């Protein structure tokens, strides 16, 4: 008996959001999307019952814009389990270890979707458990334990159940948006998470001085800042240039925004003509960022899981060998393997004159850490981009079949999938690697220079790219809404 036969009774019965029977009107899609977005914001602002609010640490804080969760909320794990499950399945599928034909066999498609859901459920439990039961991230409230008479462990079980359910909810919220809304839930949640940080970086204000971009400049212009923070002093100039929410952060944010929008518009357009409809022509665009920025989620999620493992080992293993890593009181690695694998997330982690680098960290250690981060992001970005293209039906073979099935052909070439595939092989593999490496480089650069709201470079790249693609999809939906015959042509009816 193969594993598919053994697992089919379980995988085929996994709960699933039904696809719409017919065409979903554009307004209804927007309604579903907006509704799920409201639910997402609602859940990110609810603390689990029994949690000692404000007493735990959020090690995933530096990855929050990528994982789209909220520390100390029901969506603590965010999209992390979905991304981790995707990584596992892509690696297994890329090595052809699953033996599933997800392109042509409907039965295998059901098994794949069921397997993905099962993995998300397992990863959600494995992610939530150490956060709750180690007591370092989501500590239980002793007052609640005493009032209910169930002890600390009982409250921890309650918190775990709520965090686990939150991880399952975000899975089905993603599925609802993908089938009934516009775009994907994962992309929508990333945009929402990053937008919150950017808006806060521009408009936040605090009487203690931790202000956003506009509040900082308001203080400078109207003189509501200490003399030592005047832009005409060395300390004040450093504050305006380097502290969160100021000139360098604004420049980096605008630069990354412009580069991503420009890269999305750079493309090689392959001419197409309809085989049966004379005069019907089109173009197949191969964009510079062909695989999109989404594979960066996989790279950063892998780094987040590595750092999470190091944090758990450090807190639970008193005799952890020094070569694995030593941790500061703030819970950050300052030496060893986990230090070098920890991506640089801010200017303060490599600019000495900002005074944030521990005394035990030598310049060569930072150089090695930066080199590892660059290698991880550039090489990892290219590799995961290739996996993404091959597993999402964007590769040369799958694209050739799609063009063939749509009745289109490349002028001057025989109407044959193999011929079209050879033409696609001239562009898609090379553009995929270049685009993946470029996105990785931009993500590291944005982290090094800092952004408005202290959004991670990967998070900013994801938000801009996803928003651009969402705009294109909305424009396409509106076009098909005005011209119903186009839905039949593109198979969207």
Image: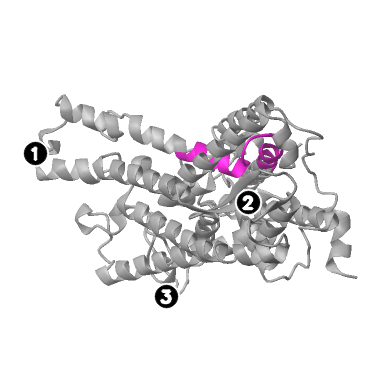
Name the element at disc 2: strand
Check the image and report above or below for 112 versus 469.
below
Name the element at disc 3: loop
Please tell me in which quadrant of the rendered image residue 478 appears: top right
Using a 10 Å C-alpha cutoff, classify the residue at mark 3 as few (fewer than 14 neighbours), some (14 to 19) or many (20 or more). Answer: few
Mark 1 vs mark 3, CA separation in Å: 46 Å
For label 1, the residue is 232
Tell me which residue sits at (79%, 55%) in the image: 109
Q: Which residues are magenta?
A: 172-194
Which is more toward the observer, 54 or 164? 164
Which numbered marker is on residue 272?
2
- Taking the image as shown, residue 180 lies to the left or right of residue 15, namely left
For label 3, the residue is 323
Residue 446 place in picture, x, y as percent: 36, 52
Q: Say whether disc 1 or disc 3 marks the residue closer to the N-terminus.
A: 1
Q: Residue 402 colored magenta?
A: no
């Amino acid at each position: 008996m193969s594993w598919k036969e053994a697992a089919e009774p379980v995988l085929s019965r996994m709960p699933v959001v039904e696809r719409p029977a017919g065409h979903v009107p554009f307004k209804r899609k927007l309604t579903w999307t907006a509704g799920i977005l409201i639910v997402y914001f609602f859940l990110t602002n609810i603390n689990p019952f029994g949690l000692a609010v404000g007493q735990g640490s959020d090690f995933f804080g530096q990855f929050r814009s990528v994982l789209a969760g909220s520390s100390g909320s029901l969506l603590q794990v965010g999209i992390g389990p979905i991304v981790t499950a995707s990584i596992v399945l892509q690696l297994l599928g890329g090595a052809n270890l699953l033996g599933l034909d997800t392109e042509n066999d409907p039965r295998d498609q059901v098994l794949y979707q069921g397997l993905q859901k099962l993995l998300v459920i397992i990863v959600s439990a494995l992610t939530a458990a150490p956060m709750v039961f180690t007591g370092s991230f989501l500590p239980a409230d002793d007052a609640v334990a005493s009032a209910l008479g169930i002890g600390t462990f009982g409250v921890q079980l309650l918190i775990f159940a709520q965090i686990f359910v939150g991880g399952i909810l975000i899975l089905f919220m993603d599925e609802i948006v993908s089938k009934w809304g516009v775009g994907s839930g994962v992309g929508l949640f990333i945009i929402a998470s990053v937008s919150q940080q950017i808006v806060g970086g521009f408009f936040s204000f605090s009487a203690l001085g931790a202000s956003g971009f506009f509040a900082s400049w308001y203080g400078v212009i109207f003189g509501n800042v200490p003399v030592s923070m005047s832009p005409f002093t060395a300390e004040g100039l450093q504050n305006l240039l380097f502290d969160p929410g100021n000139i360098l952060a604004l420049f980096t944010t605008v630069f990354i925004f412009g580069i991503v929008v420009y890269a999305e518009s750079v493309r090689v357009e392959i001419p197409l003509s309809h085989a049966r409809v004379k005069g019907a022509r089109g173009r197949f665009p191969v964009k510079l960022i062909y695989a999109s920025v989404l594979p960066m989620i996989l790279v950063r999620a892998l780094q987040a899981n590595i750092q999470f493992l190091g944090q758990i080992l450090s807190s639970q293993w008193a005799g952890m060998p020094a070569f694995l890593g030593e941790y500061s009181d703030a819970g950050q690695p300052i030496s060893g393997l986990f230090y070098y694998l920890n991506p640089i997330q801010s200017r303060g982690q490599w600019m000495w004159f900002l005074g944030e680098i521990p005394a035990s960290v030598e310049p060569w250690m930072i150089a090695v850490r930066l080199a590892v981060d660059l290698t991880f992001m550039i090489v990892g970005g290219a590799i995961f981009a290739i996996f993404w293209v091959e597993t999402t039906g964007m590769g040369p073979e799958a694209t050739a079949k799609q063009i063939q099935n749509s009745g289109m052909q490349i002028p001057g070439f025989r109407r044959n999938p193999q011929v079209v595939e050879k033409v696609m092989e001239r562009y898609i593999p090379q553009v995929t690697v270049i685009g993946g490496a470029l996105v990785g480089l931009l993500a590291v650069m944005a982290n090094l220079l800092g952004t408005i709201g202290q959004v991670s470079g990967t998070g900013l790249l994801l938000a801009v790219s996803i928003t651009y693609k969402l705009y294109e999809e909305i424009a396409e939906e509106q076009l098909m809404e005005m011209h119903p015959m186009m839905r039949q042509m593109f198979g969207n009816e």
